[in-house]
Image (spheres, rainbow, N blue to C red):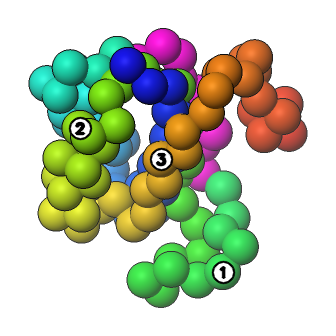
Amino acid sequence: MNKFEAILLISPEVSKSTLNDNIKNFEESISNNSGKIKDTEDWGLRDLSYVINNFKKAFYKYYQLEINGNNIKNITRILNQNDNIIRHLFIRVNEHQELPTNLNYEKN
């Protein structure tokens, strides 16, 4: 199992229940692909650095994962089919950083 950090950017136009459903679907797709979520942070609604799909803001969700790298392709395919996920990023790391992250400190 490799260690990854993932960030999801979710449309600001979704309702709270739809937001929670999208997060739950992502978490289920991780476990369905033999992955494990080590930790997570909700960074909330934040400004984007640039406009994406006519959005200036997005809900940010941060994950620390342990999953086989080959399974990331399956998860990426699922995320690309979801119109509410406007961006996603997976980064392979040697060690997970200690939580809470600096971005979470900025939010408070």
Picture residue at 17% right of the left edge, 28% below the top: 33
The vertical placement of 12 against 6, above or below, is below
Q: Which-is-in-front pick, marks 3 and 1?
A: 3
- Going by the numbered disc 2, the residue's amino acid type is Asn
Q: What's the distance in space between the residues labelled 2 and 3, CA to CA?
A: 12 Å
The vertical placement of 81 against 56, above or below, is above
Q: What element does badge 2 sit on?
A: helix
**What mark, if any, has residue 64 been given in the picture?**
none
Residues packed near mark 1 inside 10 Å, few (<14), some (14 to 19) or many (20 plus): few
Q: What's the distance in space between the residues labelled 3 and 1, CA to CA?
A: 20 Å
Residues packed near mark 2 inside 10 Å, few (<14), some (14 to 19) or many (20 plus): some
**What mark, if any, has residue 90 been given in the picture?**
3
Per the image, the residue denoted by label 2 is: 71
Q: Which residues are magenta?
A: 37-45
Q: 1 or 9: which is nearer to us? A: 1
Q: In the rendered image, is residue 14 in sight?
A: yes
What secondary structure is the magenta-colored segment mainly? strand
Picture residue at 16% right of the left edge, 63% below the top: 81
- Going by the numbered disc 3, the residue's amino acid type is Phe
Per the image, the residue denoted by label 1 is: 50
Q: Which sits earlier in the primary sequence, circle 1 or circle 2?
A: 1
Q: What's the distance in space between the residues labelled 1 and 2, CA to CA?
A: 30 Å
* Residue 102, quarter of the rendered image: top right
